[in-house]
Every structure is written in C-alpha cells, then in structure tokens.
Image (spheres, rainbow, N blue to C red):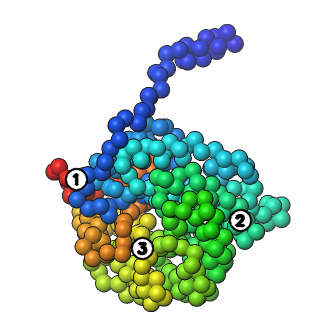
Amino acid sequence: MQLVALILLTTFLVRPPGVLVVLGEPQQVQTTNPKVGVHTRLMDEVELWKIQRTLVLAREMGAAWIVEYFPWAYIEPEAGHYDWSHSDAIIAHAANQGLTVIARLGMVPEWARPDPEIQETTFTYLDEPAYEQFAAYAAAFAARYGDTVPYIIIWNEPNLSYEWGFRPVDPESYVKLLATVYPLVHQAHPNVNILAGALAPTLEPEGSPAGLNDLLYLERIYEADGAAYFDGLAAHAYGLVFPPEAAPAPELLNFRRVELLRELMVRYGDADKPVFVTEGGWNDHPRWTWSVKPAQRVTYSLGAYALALDQWSWCPAVVLWVFRTPTPLRNYQDYFAFVTSDFRERPIYTFAQQEFTVNK
C-alpha cells in the first residue's frame, strides 16, 4: 500500500498544470459574408481551452453566427436547481469572439418525464404536462442570457418521431408548446426572439411512423394558429448530392427547399418573419450514399453561403452542420465537420477561410 500511495503522490506532483484560459481583448468578426454560421457542440466539450479554440477558429474562418445546443437536462438536472457554469463559459467566450449565438433548447431531464416504472421514455419525450416546466427553463435561460443571446430555438426537428419521443408527431401539440413558452420568454427578456421549427427536411406522408413532411407540418402549425407564438422560423437545409442552386420542388430534398417553407409563410401572411437555416450542408464521406466528393463539398458549401447572401433577403444566417465535435463519432457524421476533434482543419475550413476573411 505504501508503494501505491507513493506512486499516486508522485503522479500528482509531476503532472503538468492545467491550461490557463483567459478571455483576452474582445474581438470582432471580419467577414465578407455576414450570413456565414456554423453549428457548434460545446456543451459536450469538457476543457475550457478547447471551447475557446473552437470559437477562435470559427471567427477566423469568417463565421459571424453559431448555433449551440443547451440541453435542459444538463442545466437543470434537478427540478429548480440550475447549473449555469458551463453555459456561462461558452456564451462568455462566444461574445468575446464577437459571435452571435442562436441557442437550441431541448433534452428532457428524467424528473420532467413520466415515471419510468409506468412508462419508458427517452430524452426527447416532452409531454404536455411538462410544457410549463420546459417554459420555465426557457424563461430562465432568456433572463440570464438575453442581452447576448438574441434567438432561442424551441425544440429540434419536432416533425421527426425520434425527436418527438418516438411518438407520432403532433404539430398541434407543438403549437401548444410554443404558446406556453412564448409569453414566459418575452416576459423574462423582451428582446429575445423565439424561433419555431428547426424542421427536418423529409418527405414522410401523413400517418408515417417516422415523421411528417416539413411543408405539411408547417402548414398545420399555421392552421392551429401557431403564428402568434414565434418570431422567426428555424429550418434545416441539407443539400445531399445536389448543388445549392438546384431548384426546389415539393418532392425533392435539397438546399433550396427552404424557399418552399418561405413561400408557405408568405401565403399565411407571415412574410415579415425571418427564416434561419440552423443546420445544413454537405457530407464528404468516401462511401456514404448521400455524400459528395471533398471538392464538391467545398464548392457547394461556399455556394450556399453566397446564394443566401445574394438571393435570400429574408434569411439572416446560414448555419451549417457541424463545425467540430468534442470527440470523433467514427462514422459518416465525422465528414460533416469543418475541423476535426483534435483541431486539424479540413479542406472545407481552409477554403471557407480564404473566401470569407477580409484580409486575404
């Protein structure tokens, strides 16, 4: 035992000190395209220096926007007990880099789900009795961060069964969620904008166990009088194997499908509301069915950012998935990344930086 204790003591004494991380001088994003954004995953990043490095790289690429996921289950693991330490650090470092944060809220803690002895549920299961608890979390988030986080997305891809707790999707119930959240958030901070949807592009028909066509889902939101409860729409725009300029069509999934959502909003008298692309992009995995070649990914991604700047006056930001993940996923999803988990810049990052930085 004495030998083991000596080894442990020696290991403690000789280990290198932790990395000191300070905010430094506030930065401003210098970009040729103010609509460029990237989706980060920093709530799952443990080390503060990696959070800072990720956000520095995003700014240096010319991105002005980030979407970050702030899971309810992480921040309020017990009812009424909030732990803001990690989200405080992320938002402080994002603000220090001059980045505008769009916050995505979701992930239901166990205490807000049905008793597991009665019903087994997943972290995406939010039933109507818990809407008020989720709204209280969203309001607390807005009150704390509303001065620096102007946009909050309520839920993620509610038109997919997986994201709706493996239940049949329910646009009318989603409207009830918006109606519960909206007044509390605006009361907590009047300048925070509620973004609805974060709709997944899908062609699933009515009655499908997998989900519901995003166009049909949005139409049902409007038919349920949901327009009163959101300030803008969040939409996902994956290009799959099609170039960004490919024309939209109801039976096609491509980048410009977002324009069909916009047309629907105009039809329902909601033309003044913006549409944010909060996920999207192309994948360059060498063997995935829906991937493209690395050079195509670069061309298509830069083209998508340019298209939004030139043609989509109603779209303030195009935020592509995903800038970097804390650890490799070891599947095709790693090939959405701009930067690897160990901070190696992939070609998409290099070319984007050349395209969007002011001092080329």
Which class describes the residues within 10 Å of circle 1: few (<14), some (14-19), or many (20+)?
A: some
Q: Are marks 2 and 1 in contact (CB under 8 Å)?
A: no
Asked if residue 41 can be seen in this view, the reply is no
Of tags 2 and 1, which is closer to the observer? 2
Q: Where is residue 6 in the image (x, y as percent from the top left)?
A: 61, 11
Q: Which amino acid does label 2 sit on?
A: Glu
**Residue placed under numbered mark 2 in the picture:** 132
Quadrant of image for the N terminus: top right
As helix, strand or loop, the secondary structure at mark 1 comes to loop
**Residue placed under numbered mark 3 in the picture:** 275
Residue farthest toward the left in the current orientation of the protein: 360
Give the left or right position of residue 195, taking residue 83 as reference: left
Query: In which quarter of the view is residue 63 placed?
Result: bottom left
Q: Distance between the residues labelled 3 and 2?
A: 26 Å
**Residue placed under numbered mark 1 in the picture:** 357
Q: What residue type is labelled 1?
A: Thr
Q: What residue type is labelled 3?
A: Val
Task: Give the mark nearer the N terminus: 3 vs 1.
Answer: 3
Q: Position of residue 326 (x, y in %)?
A: 47, 46
